[in-house]
Image (spheres, rainbow, N blue to C red):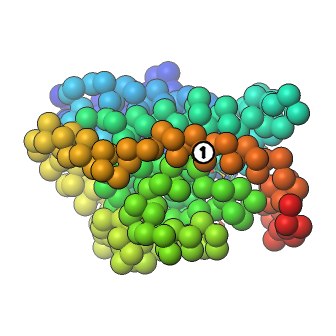
Amino acid sequence: MSDSTDSQELQTVNVVRRGGVATVELNRPTKLNAWDKQFGLDLLHAIETVGADDSVRAVVIRGAGRGFSAGADLTSMGSGDDHPSTPDGLPDVYKVLTQRYHPIISGIRNMPKPVVAAVHGPAAGIGCSLALACDLVVADPTAYFLLAFVNIGLVPDGGSSLFIPARIGFARAAQMAMLGERVNADQALQWGLINRVFADGTFDQEVDALMDGLAAGPTASYAGTKRQLNNWLYARMDEQLELEATIQQEMIGSADFTEGVLAFTSKRPPNFCGS
Ligand code: T3D
């Protein structure tokens, strides 16, 4: 199979194929690849497409521009075009998560081939969840992992409340979720949150080599391993995703969420009131 691009219908995600490797490139660089409606639709389409194509034997997810992804687009979260509303007039985040975003996360976990996140710069909010939903996570030295949710009065979603404790245990998961601090690439490697940090300047070459090896490997064996790990660690994933979405919807109605988003868009620290 020769090099090709399959992104004609997609506006915010590119799918590029090289042999048996498909690269899914998140492509809203001016917004640090933040998730809006179009992005969610495009990413789901990309994941479904590469998952269903037997000629694709390994998938890597990367970000265009200076980072992996900054999570939900905070400038469009309350907009009617982007978000359905609840009867109370709040953004219906439960619906967005369960209908738009969960199939992306489940699609990665259930895809019968290896999926790698290749992270540079920020992987924040649901962007962090996306990276950690993958089977392997490799990083450039610029990468950091940030459960930014708490910084705007939200809670982890997109599977972070499941994937992170499974990788690094309760203490570090609570630290990430409740303190909302950046975990840089070396720290993430030391904690066991991710698999490798490539030396400065070698990222593209090392990612290509890793992906070529996976695409030439025993695909059915990789798929079997995924089923085993999913069964042991993530058997209740759907239930946990549902819980995340339910609690996130509760947070959306809080004064602290309103203040968190206002503070972010005004580029100032938040002043939380506690409710
Ligand atoms: O319904 C649903 O969608 C529910 C789902 C919720 C899931 C979530 O993911 S909630 C969490 C959302 N994400 C965040 O809270 C992270 C917000 N971003 C940041 O904290 C910082 O941008 C970073 C730490 C990621 C990076 O910082 P830095 O200093 O490198 O970059 P910056 O200057 O903050 O951002 C660069 C630009 O991207 C900037 O725009 P400008 O000023 O150049 O026009 C910034 O506003 C924009 N940007 C960054 N993150 C977002 C964003 N725009 C919209 N949404 C963002 N999340």
In the picture, the quarter occupied by the C terminus is bottom right
Judge left or right: residue 80 versus residue 73.
right
Q: In this rendering, is residue 33 above or below 88?
A: below
Residue at x 38% of width, y 64% of height: 167
Residue type at numbered disc 1? Leu
Judge left or right: residue 137 versus residue 159.
left
Q: Circle 1 is placed at which residue position?
A: 243
Element type where label 1 sits in the image:
helix
Q: Nearer the viewer, residue 144 or 120?
A: 144
In the picture, the quarter occupied by the N terminus is top left
Q: Nearer the viewer, residue 85 or 262?
A: 85
Q: Does mark 1's beta carbon lie closer than 8 Å to ligand 1?
A: no
Q: In this rendering, is residue 89 above or below 120?
A: above
Residue 49 in percent (x, y) is at 37, 25
User: Is residue 155 visible to the viewer in this orientation of the structure?
Assistant: yes
- Ligand 1 lies in which image quarter? bottom right
Residue 25 in percent (x, y) is at 44, 42
Residue at x 43% of width, y 44% of height: 236
Number of numbered labels in the structure image: 1
Residue at x 21% of width, y 39% of height: 223
User: Is residue 141 visible to the viewer in this orientation of the structure?
Assistant: no
Residue 231: which quarter of the image? Answer: top left
Residue 142 in percent (x, y) is at 46, 70
